[in-house]
Amino acid sequence: MAGMDTFAERLTRTIARGTSRRSLLAKLGLGMTGAAAFPVLPVARAATHPEGPAHQTVTSGTIQDPGDRTTCDYWRYCAIDGFLCTCCGGAVNQCPPGTEMSPITWIGTCTNPADNRAYIISYNDCCGTSSCGQCLCNRNEGDRPQVRTQSNNDYNWCLGTGSSVYNCSTAVIVGVALDHPR
Amino acid sequence: MTVRIRLLPILGLALIGAAPGTMPGVPDAEQATADYMLKCQGCHRPDGSGDDRSNPPMRGMVARFLTVPGGREFLGRVPGVATTNLDDARLAQLLNWTLYRFDAGHVPRDFHPYTPAEVGSLRQNPLRLDRQAVRARLVARFAQTDQF
């Protein structure tokens, strides 16, 4: 019993000698700051947004061409199958830097909700660097089976470019469709 | 003087007749333009230029097929034409429009525009894998008659 008493006394004296009386406050403060800062770390942000980083809204600025071009709901994307160049450093009609726009494209029509007319849309792919990986959009309206090669969008349309590596897709208006398209 | 004045309206009419807006066998050029965009342009390019690796050029080229035997039939049987999902009337119009739009200079003087019936019968028998060989033979044929 006396041994235990001696042991406890030595332990207490060792701690008292090795620590200051205010160190508890310092350690508590450090812990509180750390706990407050933890959600700001990138790890925590990724955990709370599993769908990926949010993109800033990109609009045309005119009511004739409504919608957010970084979302799959934008009217021109009605037949798209791929990553939206607007989310990849490019634009709805422009390739990101370092990529090359394919001259050979998948062409379809989409209805503009502003005037209810069908517009002819050319989905030029951007090629040359590996997949962008942002804003995947796969709507495929008017897509045809692969036996109709010229109307199927599951193919890699990076044709006629220096590289056939796919990066992202644009949606360029090339004309106005007539009343009875097929 | 009076003769000249009388001639002017006739000259005007002649000019209208030769205007680029009127193409034989193309009743609705606007429709043909839209059909070209939807069915052809994606591969053959907006200006018909194409390339020699993927899609053959049509600009300055396509009407030359009409000058060699079998060429007229080839243009109706080549897969991109024959298997396009347009009815015979719109396909015939699109074919005629393509000839005048991209290669008016080579359209023969005695050219009769494709009719829906002719296109309808040609597309019943589309070319498949033999398209490249047939095309190469025809190109070699009209290359022989080059005036350059």
Image: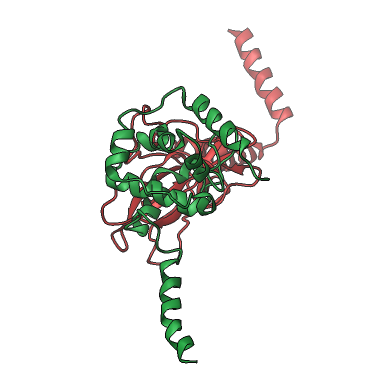
Chain colours: A red, B green
Q: Is residue A59 above or below residue A166?
A: below
- What residue is at 69 percent from the left and 29 percent from the top? A16
Q: Position of residue B24 (x, y in %)?
A: 38, 56
Image quadrant containing the C terminus of chain B:
top right
Q: Which of A7 and A135 is in front in this view?
A: A135
Q: How many labels does the image show?
A: 0
Q: Where is residue A1 in the image (x, y as percent from the top left)?
A: 58, 7
In which quarter of the view is residue A9 placed?
Answer: top right
- What residue is at 33 percent from the left and 44 percent from the top? B91
In which quarter of the view is residue A108 placed?
Answer: top left
Can residue B17 be seen here? The reply is yes
A20 relative to A39 in the view: left or right: right
Q: Nearer the viewer, residue A1 or A153?
A: A153
A75 relative to B15 in the view: left or right: left
Q: Where is residue A23 in the image (x, y as percent from the top left)?
A: 66, 37
Q: Nearer the viewer, residue B74 or B70?
A: B70
Q: Which of A113 and B139 is in front in this view?
A: B139
Q: Is residue A47 above or below residue B18?
A: above
Q: Which residue lies furthest to the right in this view?
A: A17
In which quarter of the view is residue B122 placed?
Answer: top left
Q: Where is residue B138 in the image (x, y as percent from the top left)?
A: 53, 32
Can residue A92 be seen here? The reply is no
Q: In this view, does A62 lie above or below A71?
A: below
